[in-house]
Amino acid sequence: MNRDESHKGKGKSGGRKAPAPFHASAARPHHDEAAATEIARNAFSRERYEFLLRVLFITFGVLALSVVANVFFGMRPVPVRYFATDPEGGIREVIPLERPIQTTNEVLNWATDSVVRSFTLNFANYQSQLNEHRLLFTDSGWKSYQNALERSKVLATIIKEQLASTAVPQGAPVIVSQGIVEGGRYGWRIELPLLLTYENVSGRNSEPRVVELVVVRRPEVENPRGLGIAQIFAR
């Protein structure tokens, strides 16, 4: 090898650059970025899982409430309502006999008026009066009323002595008790003080009485007011 070639070889080797040394600090930013991305992804997955879990719990809760409500309303008896047509062609609800249909004052007013009418008789037309009174009573109440007239001999005396009897309330009627009575109907036990007066051409005689009666619900086809006297007696 001559000197020129030796110089050329030295020139080539002398001009080549050495590779840069590897530093760990240069790769750390990429590693930290990847770790942060993984943490964010895990946090998002955890939040999504918790959200879906809450939705699942809420769904189960709503479903459970729906089942309970369906069972409750399914086992709850449905009230039955009945309707009828009155003589004028109107439609009205038929109230079950175990429920009151009037207010307390309406019942007391009806009872007072019915008792006064029941004790108003005269020898001339007592038969037609009794036929009118019949509408105020139930079947058992009518028998009770007839028995009371017979036992007290009031009707027999009116006919024999040609009397006219009238009744005047001497005080406010009082409800002694109320509720479901025999037969499953709603009823009221009432006391009413009366002054009974018997009169004919010979004179007048008055006597105080206390009338006890039981008023019960009855079908409105039997009585427009839906009431009837089931028991009655005077003392």
Image (cartoon, rainbow, N blue to C red):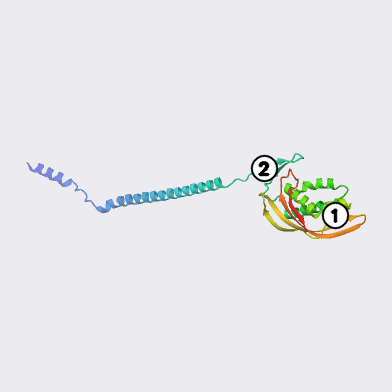
Instruction: Give the image location of residue 81, x and y in percent.
Output: 65, 44
Query: How far is disc 2 from disc 1 in space, using C-alphas?
Result: 40 Å
- The kind of residue tagged 2 is Tyr
Q: Earlier in the sequence, mark 2 or mark 1?
A: 2
Q: Is residue 209 visible?
A: yes
Residue extending farthest to the right is 201
Residue furthest to the left in view is: 1
| Quarter assignment of residue 131 | top right
Other residues around mark 2 within 10 Å, as few (<14) / some (14–19) / many (≥20): few
For image coordinates 89% across by 58% down, the residue present is 204
Q: Residue at x 71, y 54 (%)?
A: 188
Residue matched to label 1: 166
Closer-to-camera residue (87/27): 87
Tag 1 secondary structure: strand
Left or right of 185? Residue 33 is: left
Under circle 2, the secondary element is: strand
Q: Which mark is residue 30?
A: none
Amino acid type, label 1:
Thr
Please state the total of marks drawn on the protein image. Answer: 2
Disc 2 versus disc 1: nearer the observer: 1
Query: How far across and down, in percent of the image, does residue 123 sit?
Result: 87, 49
Position in image of residue 103 (x %, y %): 72, 53
Task: Please name the residue shown 78% across and 46% down the image.
Answer: 135
* Residue 109 spot, x, y in % from top left: 77, 54
Q: The C terminus lies in which quarter of the figure?
A: bottom right
**Is residue 233 rendered to the left or right of residue 34?**
right
**Which residue is tagged 2?**
82
The front one of 121 and 27 is 121
Task: Depth check: give the residue in front, 163 or 196.
Answer: 163
Mark yes or no: residue 120 visible: no
Residue most extreme to the top: 89
How many C-alpha atoms fall within 10 Å of the one at disc 1: few (<14), some, or many (≥20)?
some
